[in-house]
Amino acid sequence: MTTLIKADRYKLRKSRSLKVCLIVAFGLGILMAVLYHMAWKTLGDNLEATRSMMTAFGSDEKTVDEMLSIIPEENLWAYITTALADTNVLYIAAIVISIFVGSEYSMGTIKNAVARGYARPAIYGSKLLLSMLAMLLVVVAYVLGGGTVGVVLYGFSAKAAVGQMFLQMAAYLVEYIAVCGLYVMIAVLLKSTGHAIAFSLVMPMLVSSVLQIVVMAYSNNDLISRLWLFQTVTATQQLCQYGNAHVPFLSAAVYFTVTLVIGLFVFHRQEIK
């Protein structure tokens, strides 16, 4: 497997899509942080009016408090956690991973490793490990972009406790690994770069929309964050702060295990041409 990892690492290092997406992630991180700051400034200046308006439109107090809690305190850590919770970075990573894994099928190179006698679990594991690396690189680039704005505005500052910061970072890490496992599984199932990119981008939105309807029907505000991984990522900071830190860890473990089992099973049964 070491040889496979070296080969995939070389391929990832030479990947133009990774380089482009890293630049895009960094630039988008800066842009989104600036836009968030402008929006938060306006919202913060009119907090009571915003609360009254949301209440007038039928939102309950719990929902209003949760939505307004996203307004960050004026410190660097607030901007870092906002970047970590932003699903935009997951969509950028979806493109990188879909190209990295899907291109093996589109170009027909996946059969080379199989023909050389490498075990299929080892091939899949190598793709998964390097996809995790790609995911983390994109996330770091995005956080650096957002963090740059935070540093300019507030310097190196944080109001969260050190233990809470490490807890949140650990939760985000395992969630990103789980999302990566999902993207790799999709690329293996679809065996096409284009199809994998499209499905990885559209599927999270469709699932979120369906669950939003279910939430409205059953008045369960916690349903999405406990069932859908992408929404759990968004809610991680609140979950960790209010004693529900087990939710992101448990959700990530379930998603990663399920996608790994499905991905390995399908890849083992695939006819590689």
Image: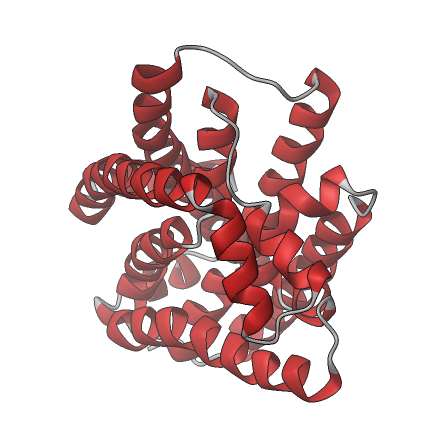
Q: Residue at x 68, y 54 (%)?
A: 252
Q: Is residue 242 above or below residue 147?
A: below
Where's the C terminus, which quadrant?
bottom left
Q: Report the front residue among 14 and 114.
A: 14
In front here: 176 or 256? 176
Q: Is residue 10 above or below residue 100?
A: above
Residue 91: quadrant of the picture: bottom left
Horizontal side of residue 192 vs 180, given as left or right: left
Residue 71, given in percent of the width and then of the height, sits at 51, 41
The answer to whether any part of residue 123 appears in the image is no
Q: Position of residue 222 (x, y in %)?
A: 73, 66
State the count of labels.
0
Q: Is residue 139 above or below residue 73?
A: below
Residue 18 percent location from the top left of the image: 25, 44
Instruction: Report if residue 214 is visible in the image.
Output: yes
Residue with the most extreme bottom position: 217
Q: At 44% across and 81% down in the image, what residue appears?
A: 271
Residue appearing at x 47%, y 61% in the figure: 184
Q: Residue 48, position in %: x, y?
A: 53, 49
Which quadrant of the view contains residue 251? bottom right
